[in-house]
Amino acid sequence: MQFSAAAHVRHPRHYASGMRSPTLAPVFFATIAVLALSGCTPAPAAPDPDELRAWQNDRSGLEEGPGVLGAMTGGAAPTDAAPTDAPPDQPHGTTMAFASDVDIDSVDVTCFGEARISVEVEFTGASSGRTVGGEGVPCADGTFTAENPLSGRTFTVRVDVYDADVETAWRAIVRGAEAG
């Protein structure tokens, strides 16, 4: 039995009609373009300086309420370096030290506008310190809460907000109770 080479070759028309569709190529490339561009979102616009200043100056609720031990505020900008970039002998961030021992439950950090920030909250006790943090935290989503990972008394809390994609301001509320 002999086979002709032509008998095993499909006609190009079979590929065009059954194997491929000429309309899939544009759809495929459009899908790839959308996926590639979706990761390239632009940074939010810089906030209005007057709105930013008003938010910074509004102290309502900062040191009120049950379980509030204190509050800290500050600003963050794209030029702020990460705490690991700071020299070890120069503390980075804002620190709150307590004259007496306190049981800190958590620190709630909020920030202004549409910025995204990186946050580090360091809890220091008698014999150890631990840091809780997050990167790319969106200000518009509300509060970043850092739960205290230490057991026992806490003496200081350091909050560092850095690497903002636009200028912003932040507030940190330290929650807990006086040790007793």
Image (spheres, rainbow, N blue to C red):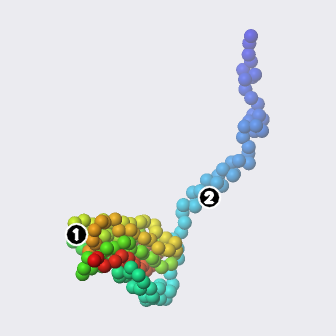
Q: Position of residue 95 (x, y in %)?
A: 30, 77
Few, some or many C-alpha atoms within 10 Å of disc 1 (few <14, some 14-19, many ≥20)?
A: few
Identify the residue at image location x=42%, y=74%: 108
Residue 172 visible in this rendered orientation of the protein = yes
Q: Position of residue 114 (x, y in %)?
A: 51, 75
Residue 93 lies, with reference to residue 84, above or below; the image says below
Identify the residue at image location x=24%, y=74%: 90
Q: Position of residue 105 (x, y in %)?
A: 36, 72
Residue at the extreme top of the image, as rendered: 1
Q: Position of residue 79 (x, y in %)?
A: 38, 73
Residue 178 circle label: none
* Number of numbered discs: 2
Q: In the picture, which quadrant includes the N terminus?
A: top right
Q: In the picture, which quadrant includes the C terminus?
A: bottom left
Few, some or many C-alpha atoms within 10 Å of disc 2 (few <14, some 14-19, many ≥20)?
A: few
Identify the residue at image location x=72%, y=20%: 5
Which amino acid type corresponds to the residue marked 2 in the rendered image? Answer: Val
Label 2: element kind: helix
**Label located before the other in sequence (1 or 2):** 2
Label 1: element kind: loop
**Residue under label 1:** 126
Quadrant assignment, res 124: bottom left
Quadrant assignment, res 19: top right
Query: Position of 123 compared to 126: left or right?
Result: right
